[in-house]
């Protein structure tokens, strides 16, 4: 069997399992409609899944559909809670194609929108091109140092998403060092007019550190237990691997002040480690 055909069949079997896991039922029309195949082929797929995973599926004559079996045990990674929640989030994205969504019955869902500054296609194209070609580029940039945008020559080398905003990691001529620059702060781009100063590699970007974080000792037991559940902390603390350059962004996202404050709910335990100390001061 050709690899592509085998992958397509596996994809349909994964879809069947997804519907069983999260909708509790699936029929041949669901499969045929989603993948553009005949009803006979959809029936064959359902039979193939039932043969492979009999404990996961049974036919309900009254519903005229296959339903989730009592001994259901997911076999495909696409049936995980993480995948379902990603699909649920995608239902709120107007850019998402319906063919990419597997959820049948969609519960009411709302997403809290985070204000994000616009990024023009021209600027993004220039930034991506500079990253791929490793060429410097001039950008008119709004910074926290000046009230008006100023030109700077940068050498971008990586893109970054912090969960809400896209940024570019680049060497900055104006600060003679590396910086994480939000794309929304770039007003205009042009080819580099001046040679970029000689600079070494971005050590903060290439260095991966392990942050050990734990609930603040002054929390109530209820607050502590809630935080442990929210962050999936096992035991007294949890470890998070992160690029050293991104420790400030991660700390901000976790609500950790740098330097730390007694008002924080979380505290960095290894704040004095050499690889961590410089990034949180």
Image (cartoon, rainbow, N blue to C red):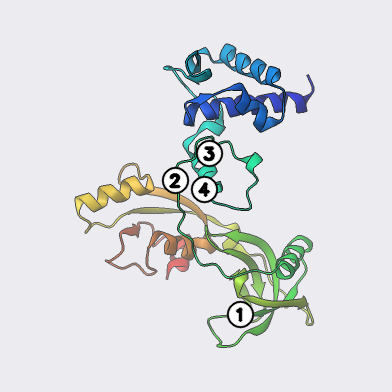
Q: Earlier in the sequence, mark 4 or mark 2?
A: 4
Disc 4 versus disc 2: nearer the observer: 2
Q: Earlier in the sequence, mark 1 or mark 3?
A: 3
Disc 2 to disc 1: CB gap under 8 Å: no
* Image position of 15 with respect to 188: above or below: above
Q: Earlier in the sequence, mark 3 or mark 4?
A: 3
**For the residues marked 1 and 3, what is the alpha-carbon distance in whole angstroms?**
42 Å
Q: Residues within 10 Å of mark 2 (few under 14, many from 20)?
A: few
Residue 55 position, x and y percent, is 48, 14
Disc 3 versus disc 4: nearer the observer: 4
Residue underneath mark 4: 89
In this rendering, would 193 be left or right of 225? right
Residue 212 position, x and y percent, is 39, 52
Q: Residue at x 60, y 40 (%)?
A: 101
**For the residues marked 4 and 1, what is the alpha-carbon distance in whole angstroms?**
39 Å
For the residue pair 207 and 27, the one nearer the viewer reads as: 27
Disc 2 versus disc 1: nearer the observer: 2
**For the residues marked 2 and 1, what is the alpha-carbon distance in whole angstroms?**
48 Å
For the residue pair 128 and 278, the one nearer the viewer reads as: 128
For the residue pair 169 and 52, the one nearer the viewer reads as: 52
Residue underneath mark 3: 83
Q: Residues within 10 Å of mark 3 (few under 14, many from 20)?
A: few
For the residue pair 9 and 29, the one nearer the viewer reads as: 29
Residue underneath mark 2: 108
* Image position of 169 with respect to 86: above or below: below
In this rendering, would 107 be left or right of 214? right
**For the residues marked 2 and 3, what is the alpha-carbon distance in whole angstroms?**
17 Å
**For the residues marked 3 and 4, what is the alpha-carbon distance in whole angstroms?**
10 Å
């Amino acid at each position: 069997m050709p690899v592509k055909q085998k992958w397509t069949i596996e994809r349909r079997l994964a879809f069947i399992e997804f519907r069983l896991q999260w909708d509790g039922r699936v029929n041949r029309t669901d499969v045929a409609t989603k993948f553009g195949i005949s009803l006979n082929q959809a029936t064959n797929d359902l039979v193939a899944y039932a043969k492979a995973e009999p404990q996961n599926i049974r036919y309900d004559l009254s519903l005229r559909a296959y339903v989730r079996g009592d001994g259901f045990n997911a076999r495909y990674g696409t049936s995980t809670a993480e995948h379902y929640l990603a699909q649920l989030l995608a239902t709120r994205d107007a850019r998402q194609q319906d063919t990419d969504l597997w959820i049948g019955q969609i519960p009411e869902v709302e997403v809290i929108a985070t204000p994000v500054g616009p990024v023009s296609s021209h600027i993004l194209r220039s930034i991506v091109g500079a990253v791929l070609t490793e060429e410097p580029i001039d950008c008119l940039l709004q910074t926290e140092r000046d009230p008006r945008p100023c030109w700077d020559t940068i050498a971008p080398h990586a893109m970054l998403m912090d969960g809400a905003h896209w940024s570019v990691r680049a060497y900055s001529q104006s600060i003679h060092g590396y910086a994480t620059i939000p794309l929304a702060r770039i007003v205009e781009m042009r080819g580099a007019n001046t040679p970029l100063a000689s600079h070494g590699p971005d050590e903060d970007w290439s260095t991966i550190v392990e942050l050990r974080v734990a609930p603040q000792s002054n929390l109530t037991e209820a607050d502590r237990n809630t935080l442990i559940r929210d962050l999936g902390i096992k035991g007294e603390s949890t470890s998070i691997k992160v690029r050293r350059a991104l420790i400030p962004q991660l700390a901000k996202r976790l609500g950790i002040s740098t330097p730390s404050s007694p008002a924080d709910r979380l505290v960095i335990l290894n704040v004095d480690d050499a690889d961590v100390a410089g990034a949180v001061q």
